[in-house]
Image (tube, rainbow, N blue to C red):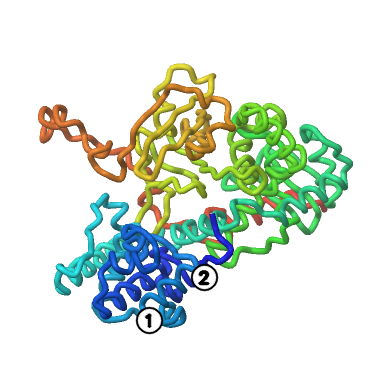
Amino acid sequence: MVLADAVPRSLLSAAPEDEEAGLDALTLGRRIRDLRTMRKMTLDALATAIERAPSQVSMIENGKREPRLSMLRTIAAALGTTVDDLLKTDAPSERAALEIAVERAQRGPVFTALGLPRIRVSKGQSDETLQTLLTLHNEIERLHRERAATPEEARRANAELRATMRSRDNYFPELEAQALELLTAVGHTGGPVSHQVVADMASHLGYSLHYVGDLPHSTRSVTDKRNGRIYLPTTQSASRDSRSPILQAFASHLCGHGEPKSYADFLRQRVETNYLTAAILLPEKDTVKLLTEAKNLRRISMEDLRDAFAVSYETAAHRFTNLATARLGIPVHFMKVHESGTMIKAYENDSVRFPSDALGAVEGSTVCRNWTARTVFDIEDRFSPWYQYTDTPSGTFWCTSRIEKAKEGDYSVSVGVPFTHVKWFRGRETSNRAVSLCPDESCCRRAPADLTDRWAGQSWPAARTPTSLLAALPTGTYPGVDQTEVYQFLEAHSPR
């Protein structure tokens, strides 16, 4: 809970990636400790002076707790200094700067990805020891960047986009307003959005729909802006909603998208397009009403949301993450995971710790075998929802998951919440429970000892390496799209 007199987060941010920011909790803590030791004051003495437990003062000095402004005034008075002096942005000494850098490194993605135990930074450790730790960390981080050089732009852009979505709780009111305006314009008054209503929207925006059998292989649809035409495939995938390609085609028009200037711009446009599509298929007012009623009855269900608006389970799960925090006050995480265990999409604002690389990207990482997104592949009944509690190093989470099919194989779609919020959901009474210690390798990254003893050195698996793993990032204005093929298609179908 943020208190009224708390020090602003713009001044106190212990995030490891925010090293360029002003003051953070680590620097503040070191300044307090430095002043205390200069005055030959023990931790207990300072705790007594400010009427707090020594453990609380220790957490402040170690940068693990952000003191309120009133507490800072009390600490400053006890140390014979001012709040302004405590809030100076520079470390109090070279040694303190080194300790802060090591602490930041340990809180960053490299240590997390490697599953390394935290080392308590104390005055008993020499400068050389701390400098060695920091040098090793920086070298590992450099090697990670070098290894990820080919897809680095995409992975950085993905990580930055996820951070933006998290900062907004995955809720975009401007896109909600656009969806409402379009629904109102075509006279939609509630309930599922039919294919005819979607066609009426296209017409309202000045587009006619044309179904063709020779759509360029690298596209889902092609929009002819000059002649006001949207070209769609005559054959529809059984796993894809026939309304979505139409909505995605003119959603770009509504969002004012131009040719992407960068890969990050391309990803942002895709997120906005998908968001607006879901906001039209599951209108905010009706969806929030249904979810609020379900919350009051303590039976929120992705299946009910899916069935009420005649959408896919994945679309319903996506839409729930848009509205869960902003409109229902529920922190949430979402995962789409391939049957191989590879994470395809992910979002979180509930403190769950996804596997990630040194750049902070999660796409392409392998999910723990004990998480709901993986265990759902082992159940026989694939027609009923799968619920599970998972105890993790960052807390206990409850998830609901389903398996869906695509041409690339089966994948799971999972929605999860922290234990304190499971009371709102159907399936909370499940007895399914698992423990995940990841990123600790003892959890699931290493084979069991008995199997290792028997087969180590006696096997030679031939890996099925996806071609995309070795391929460079698709280039072009629209990554992965053959522009010549698109232009030839438009030329052939353009009205004479």
Nearest the viewer among 336 and 214 is: 336
Residue sitting at x 72%, y 57%: 174
Task: Provide residue 475's location: percent of width, then percent of height.
Answer: 50, 60
First along the sequence among labels 2 and 1: 2
Determine if residue 431 is in view.
yes
Nearest the viewer among 221 and 425 is: 425
Work out whether 365 lies above or below 101: above
Task: Provide residue 215's location: percent of width, then percent of height.
Answer: 65, 44
Determine if residue 104 is in view.
no
* Res. 452 mark: none
Nearest the viewer among 33 and 254 is: 33
In the rendered image, the quadrant that contains the N terminus is: bottom right
Q: Quadrant of residue 457?
A: top left
- Residue under numbered circle 1: 80
Q: Quadrant of residue 29?
A: bottom left
- The three-letter code of the residue at mark 2 reads Ser
